[in-house]
Image: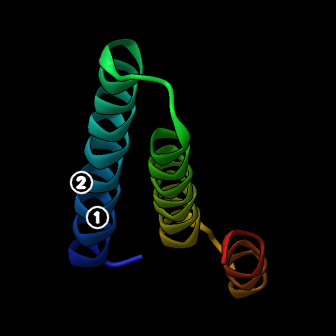
Amino acid sequence: MEYGKQIEVATITLWNFIAILVNIIVFAILYMKANRNASLKAFFLVQLSMLIWLVGKVFKTVSPTVGIRWGSILKFV
């Protein structure tokens, strides 16, 4: 793999991991401070789907072959 491509993949992966960590931290803080009702459950469902999407993006970015990349796209979409 080219050096520039490696830096691009590392940058994309790093930003996605930062987004995942921020998502989990905010998720935990909101869960501790929020009132338990139906809108909270809907919000957490949206947050969970965004988290799954971010994990899928990481797997798609770092997959070594086209077959594995295609499989991770189908699993997480």
Please state if 55 lies on the left or on the right of 1 as rendered.
right
* Residue, disc 1: 12
Q: Residue furthest top?
A: 32
* Residue 2, horizontal then vertical, whole percent: 32, 78
Q: Amino acid at mark 1?
A: Ile
* Residue, disc 2: 15
Q: Residue at x 53, y 52 (%)?
A: 42
Say which of 27 and 70 sits in front: 27
Q: Label 2 to label 1, Cα distance in Å?
A: 5 Å
Q: Residue at x 56, y 72 (%)?
A: 60
Quarter occupied by residue 32: top left
Q: Is residue 42 above or below residue 44?
A: below
Q: Residue at x 22, y 60 (%)?
A: 11
Please state if 61 lies on the left or on the right of 7 as rendered.
right
* Residue 34, horizontal then vertical, whole percent: 35, 22
- The answer to the question of whether label 2 and label 1 lie on touching residues, with beta carbons closer than 8 A, is yes
* Residue 40, horizontal then vertical, whole percent: 46, 40
Mark 1 nearby-residue class (10 Å; few <14, some 14–19, many ≥20): some
Quick one: SS at disc 2?
Answer: helix
Say which of 14 and 39 sits in front: 39
Quarter occupied by residue 17: top left
Residue 42's label in the rendered image is none
Q: Amino acid at mark 2?
A: Trp
* Residue 38, horizontal then vertical, whole percent: 55, 43
Please state if 45 lies on the left or on the right of 3 as rendered.
right
Quick one: SS at disc 1?
Answer: helix
